Amino acid sequence: MTRRSRLLLAALAVAALLWLLFAAAERALALAQRLLALPAWLQWTLGAVLLLFAAAGALVLWWLLRPRRKRRPVPAPDRDSLQQRLGRLGGHGADTTALHAELAELDRRRADARVYVALFGEISTGKSSLIRALAPDALAASDVRGGTTRTVAHHDGRLPDGRTLVLADVPGSRESGGEAHEALAREEALRAHAVVYLCAGDLSRTQMDELRWLADFGKPLLLALNKADQWDDAERAQLLSRLRRHSRTLAADVVAISAGGSERFQRRLGDGRVEQVERRRPPDVQPLLKALARLTAAGAEALEPLREHAVLAGLHERTGALEAETRAAEAERVVRKYARRAVVGAMAAVAPGSDLVIQGALAASLTRELAALYEVRVSEVQVEDFVQQARLTLRTGSSIVLAVAGNALKAFPGLGTLGGGVLHAFAYALIFDAMGRALAASLAERKTLDQRDAGERLKGLLADAQGPRLRELAALTVEAWRDGKQEEAR
Ligand SMILES: Nc1nc2c(ncn2[C@@H]2O[C@H](COP(=O)(O)OP(=O)(O)OP(=O)(O)O)[C@@H](O)[C@H]2O)c(=O)[nH]1
Ligand SMILES: [Mg+2]
């Protein structure tokens, strides 16, 4: 079409639109005049009906055009801050090898510039069979029993347009006792540019959770209904439409496929012998190949930022877990240190009464040290308040603590041999251990010095002195007591 005829067409369209608008305005005016001529009650009734229609129309329009709730992607830190955290963890003696290896793999795949696609799904949904159908030279093992695949393996696959892909076969999820294998699968899924989620029927609640988990990391996803040969056309269509409805905001496409797999059966021969036969079912994976070609059309480089985000977000979670673990171990060390000091402090007390008066300076110092470990800022007033509150808790709970200590003296003969004053020394070990653990748990969870929460935890721990912990504290008391005596002797 020439520029001139395009202009002419545009002018005609504008004129038609104007004419329509004028006509509509004229109709509206005429209607308004007729409405005004009607009796008042009819005017109000018609007005109300019109208003109702307008409101319903607006509601429908809003429902159609409402903005789709965007899934909030899992946060990902930038690489520098992550590396700093790893450095700090290494400084505290934590093993960061796996996390560093993940970063190295991130770089390696970026340089590799090939598209990685991971299969994912519950055990026995046909992932390994699908690998065999997509990458004919792969020797991925498959079996009716779940949990056949134990490691991540990569195979080269080819799309109909000739592009190549790296396909990852991973262990199936939801195997009982297979948490470590599932973790491998999840890590590989995050490393891939796209994920094919396999199912073999309607999605269970846990399968929906898995899909959502992948989508939260921003993974481009395909949902593949495998073993489609098991249903007739009508059943398959029904299943597909249900899967589409449920995964609407999660997966880019839903396809039905038959990965094939194989079946084994026994054949009785003419001479009476029984023979084991394995027969391969013919695969049909064309719809998946087409969907994969569309999903990865942008190429490795364009898909890389999303992949990097997912890997860093995954690393953020893993690093967070290691940080929490490392801190908890450090907190444990601090608490033991103070429990020892409390024992030594009790030995030095001239006349321990039956009421346990907490060693204030030591308790304050323990509070400060734990707060610093959890990077929680505390003022001196807060520390004093907390110690004061612990004192009050102990005033009412001291009889319990003394009773526990008394029982322990009988249960752990080593304690009994230490002589007078040991009851109180052991009671202090119990108190400082409970106080330290209560405070550490509260600081870790609340990220602030929440007196009420820490106080509740302290009450709980004081009332619940369990066997193995008591044994540890008894050993600690014996050790600290002996050290204290040696110190005195010098
Ligand atoms: N009817 C039918 N069976 C299939 C199909 N694909 C796979 N199977 C069968 O499903 C079973 C499990 O297949 P696998 O490929 O081992 O499944 P997987 O997901 O790799 O299992 P794990 O490695 O344990 O997680 C095998 O008995 C396959 O023969 C299919 O398209 N149709
Ligand atoms: Mg497998």
Image (tube, rainbow, N blue to C red):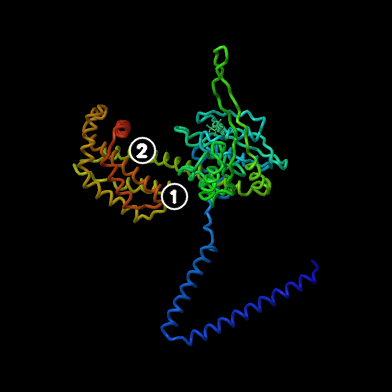
Inspect this view and state whether residue 97 appears: no
Q: Secondary structure at mark 1?
A: loop
Of residues 345 and 370, which is closer to you in this image? 370
Is ligand 1 less than 8 Å from the beta carbon at label 2?
A: no
Going by the numbered disc 1, the residue's amino acid type is Glu
Across and down, in percent, residue 339 comes to: 32, 39
- Is the residue marked by circle 2 packed among few (<14), some (14-19), or many (20+) residues within 10 Å? some
Q: Furthest residue to the top?
A: 271
Of residues 480 and 475, which is closer to you in this image? 475
Q: Give the numbered dot on residue 336.
A: 2
Across and down, in percent, residue 101 comes to: 58, 37
Q: Please indicate whether residue 137 sits to the left or right of residue 93 in the image.
A: right
Q: Please indicate whether residue 160 sits to the left or right of residue 350 in the image.
A: right
Across and down, in percent, residue 138 comes to: 64, 30
Check the image and report above or below for 239 versus 177.
below
Which quarter holds ligand 2?
top right
Quadrant where the image shows the N terminus: bottom right
Q: Residue at x 69, y 38 (%)?
A: 158
Inspect this view and state whether residue 208 appears: yes
Of residues 268 and 6, which is closer to you in this image? 268
| Residue 437 occupies quadrant | top left
Name the residue tied to disc 1: 375
Is ligand 1 less than 8 Å from the beta carbon at label 1?
A: no
| Residue 142 occupies quadrant | top right
Q: CA distance from mark 2 to mark 1?
A: 20 Å
Q: Furthest residue to the left?
A: 354
Across and down, in percent, residue 363 comes to: 32, 46
Quadrant where the image shows the C terminus: top left
Going by the numbered disc 2, the residue's amino acid type is Arg
Of residues 333 and 228, which is closer to you in this image? 228
